[in-house]
């Protein structure tokens, strides 16, 4: 009995390690875009690493209960939800690629354009209407293209929302 349990635990750990080996780089880049930290090889993007570590820990804890669910999607969803809950920490620009955007704009832009998550799924994940996701995404793209004044100068009255 113990040997069977130990074998199952080893197999679980190996499967998770294989998943992390294949997905961690992209997920770290996603987290780095969300936190608006510069992507530096010396590990200066501590906020992104913290977010990713927490999301991966949750995925590992739920590994046996995934039942055919895509672990990448599950981890990305947890990463986005954690970011939305902690968005207040990420208001100050830090020199990252998307620093001109508010946390909500970064979250929507990254999910929609970088990760390719459909509008409906993004809206469900954030707990907002699809029209809101579309408007935030369009505003974010306009800001990044320079056709709109950067949002960092605007009042930030609308917090990032996330479904639990």
Image: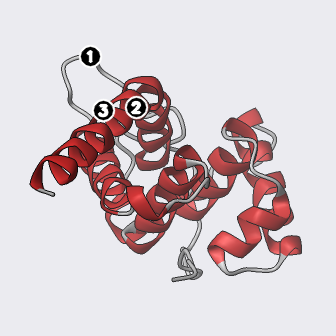
Q: Are marks 2 and 1 in contact (CB under 8 Å)?
A: no
Distance, label 3 to label 1, CA atoms, is 26 Å
Vertical relation: 132 (above or below) 48: below
Q: Looking at this rendering, what residue extends furthest in the front direction?
A: 1
Image spot of residue 50 (x, y percent): 24, 49
Q: Earlier in the sequence, mark 2 or mark 3?
A: 3
Q: Looking at this rendering, what residue extends furthest in the left direction?
A: 2
Q: Which residue is identified by label 2?
A: 24
Secondary structure of residue under mark 3? helix
Is residue 132 shown left or right of residue 40?
right
Q: Residue at x 13, y 47 (%)?
A: 3
Residue situated in front as seen by the camera: 105 or 8 = 8
Is residue 30 shown left or right of residue 56?
right
Image spot of residue 139 (x, y percent): 78, 55
Distance, label 2 to label 3, CA atoms, is 15 Å
Residue 21 found in image quarter:
top left
Q: Earlier in the sequence, mark 2 or mark 1?
A: 2
Image spot of residue 90 (x, y percent): 37, 58
Q: Coloring scheme of the render?
A: secondary structure
Q: Residue at x 67, y 36 (%)?
A: 114
Q: Which residue is identified by label 3?
A: 14
Residue 156 found in image quarter:
bottom right
Residue 15 visible in the picture: yes
Q: Which residue is identified by label 1?
A: 41
Residue 149 visible in the picture: no
Q: Residue at x 52, y 48 (%)?
A: 71
Secondary structure of residue under mark 1? loop
Vertical relation: 26 (above or below) 73: above
Judged by depth in the image, the label closer to the viewer, 3 or 1, is 3
Judged by depth in the image, the label closer to the viewer, 2 or 1, is 2
Is residue 59 shown left or right of residue 149?
left
Residue 25 found in image quarter:
top left
């Amino acid at each position: 009995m113990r040997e069977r349990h130990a074998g199952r635990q080893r197999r679980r750990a190996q499967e998770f390690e294989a998943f992390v080996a294949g997905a961690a780089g992209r997920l770290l880049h996603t987290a780095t875009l969300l936190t608006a930290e510069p992507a530096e090889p010396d590990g200066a993007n501590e906020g992104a690493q913290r977010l990713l570590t927490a999301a991966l820990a949750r995925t590992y804890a739920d590994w046996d209960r995934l039942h055919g669910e895509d672990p990448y999607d599950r981890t990305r969803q947890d990463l986005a939800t954690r970011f939305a809950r902690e968005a207040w920490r990420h208001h100050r620009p830090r020199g990252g690629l998307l620093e001109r955007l508010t946390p909500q704009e970064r979250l929507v832009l990254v999910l929609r354009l970088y990760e390719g998550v459909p509008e409906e799924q993004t809206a469900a994940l954030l707990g907002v209407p699809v029209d809101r996701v579309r408007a935030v995404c369009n505003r974010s793209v306009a800001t990044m293209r320079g056709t709109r004044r950067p949002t960092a100068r605007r009042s930030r009255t609308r917090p990032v929302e996330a479904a639990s």
